């Protein structure tokens, strides 16, 4: 009985242009040019200087003298990029915004923030007009008309997939938000805090060549102890979701039998290029794999029993 709305975004001329330009860019088309005679538009690549303040105080990681940003990429919090549209070269604008409640940093979640932003440069990539010859180079189509049809079909398919994903996400979010946990199992919380730390450490090593602990110290002047409340909150959300999955599965008799579980493991191992299922199982966390399979079953059930609001 969970209520949801479902809508598929229409295919717009702007979306077709973006799709076409991306295809041309992958084949080396497109010339980057400086813009000096107009303000920032959506799709521009700008270089900005900015200072972020919360309660009048600068915060760690909230400032830069030179930062490259594509307007419309949604790289920054809501309102940041949209607030720069219409700003002229070398102009400074103050943006009064708010961090999302679930931003992921305890000291920033839900906080009001003021960004003072200066546009250092504006660049735009100029593409040639689409021709039959270019179409043949960037696709399997024969002419511009065929390519436009192809582009429309691809965008429509992607929009439909996005709409389904949003529907499922909205339904699941409502279920988890309405679920009350009387207590969190301490062992599970500590386990998922450890999982998060290992994930962050791999990302830090890959991106910056240092451990996550060292990154916290260098970039944010923080320790692992400082971020423990944030890790605990993230782990609690993960555990709450998993406990909700299991509760629904048990209530609706959706749990997998041993035979079903092993069949899924065999199929997944083969699909991911493992020589044997044993090799696959040794490379994953079995609990996580089981829960992912259970989630799929639970999601099928809750979606089937949800109610669309027209």
Image (cartoon, rainbow, N blue to C red):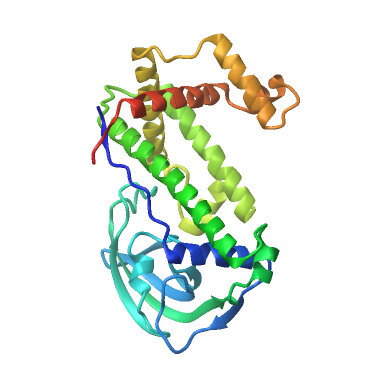
Q: Residue at x 51, y 52 (%)?
A: 153
**Of residues 162 and 151, the one drawn nearer to the viewer in this rendering:** 151
Q: Position of residue 194 (x, y in %)?
A: 51, 33
Quarter the N terminus occupies:
top left
- Along the line of sight, which residue is nearer the eye, 90 or 216? 90
- The one nearer the camera, 182 or 126, is 126
Specify whether 207 is left or right of 155.
right
**Image location of residue 168, percent across then percent down:** 38, 36
**For this view, does 18 lie left or right of residue 253?**
right
Image mark count:
0
Q: In this view, does 4 lie to the left or right of 220?
A: left
Q: Which residue is drawn at 39% across and 45% down?
A: 163
* Residue plotted at (54% across, 53% down): 215
Q: Residue 255, percent across and down?
A: 45, 14
Q: Is there any visible trace of residue 269 in the rendered image?
A: yes
Residue 190 falls in image quadrant: top left
Residue 117 image-quadrant placement: bottom left
Q: Classify the position of the C terminus by image quarter.
A: top left
Q: Which residue is depicted at the point 56% across and 78% down?
A: 126
Residue found farthest to the right: 275
Pick the residue in front: 171 or 221: 171
The answer to whether residue 210 is visible is: no
Q: Position of residue 267 (x, y in %)?
A: 64, 23
């Amino acid at each position: 009985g969970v209520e949801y709305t479902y809508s598929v975004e229409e295919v717009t001329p702007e979306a077709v242009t973006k799709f076409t330009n991306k295809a041309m860019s992958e084949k080396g088309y497109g010339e980057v040019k400086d813009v000096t005679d107009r303000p920032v538009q959506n799709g521009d690549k700008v270089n900005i200087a900015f200072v972020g303040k919360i309660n009048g105080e600068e915060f760690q990681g909230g400032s830069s003298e030179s930062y490259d940003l594509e307007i419309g990429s949604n790289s920054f919090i809501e309102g940041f990029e949209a607030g720069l549209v219409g700003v002229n070269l070398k102009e400074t604008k103050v943006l009064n915004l708010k961090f999302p409640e679930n931003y992921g940093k305890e000291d920033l979640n839900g906080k009001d923030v003021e960004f003072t932003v200066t546009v250092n440069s504006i660049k735009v990539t100029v593409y040639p007009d689409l021709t039959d010859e270019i179409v043949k180079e960037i696709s399997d189509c024969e002419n511009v008309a065929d390519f436009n049809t192809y582009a429309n079909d691809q965008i429509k398919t992607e929009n439909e997939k996005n709409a389904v994903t949003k529907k499922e996400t909205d339904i699941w979010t409502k279920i988890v938000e309405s679920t009350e946990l009387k207590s969190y199992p301490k062992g599970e919380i500590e386990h998922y805090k450890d999982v998060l730390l290992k994930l962050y450490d791999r990302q830090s090593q890959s991106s910056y060549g240092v451990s996550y602990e060292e990154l916290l110290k260098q970039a944010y002047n923080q320790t692992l102890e400082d971020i423990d409340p944030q890790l605990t909150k993230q782990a609690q959300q993960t555990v709450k979701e998993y406990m909700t999955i299991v509760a629904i599965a048990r209530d609706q008799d959706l749990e997998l039998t041993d035979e079903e579980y092993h069949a899924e493991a065999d199929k997944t191992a083969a699909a991911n290029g493992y020589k044997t299922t044993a090799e696959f199982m040794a490379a994953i966390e079995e609990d996580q794999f089981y829960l992912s399979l259970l989630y799929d079953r639970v999601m099928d059930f809750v979606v089937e029993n949800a109610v669309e609001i027209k």
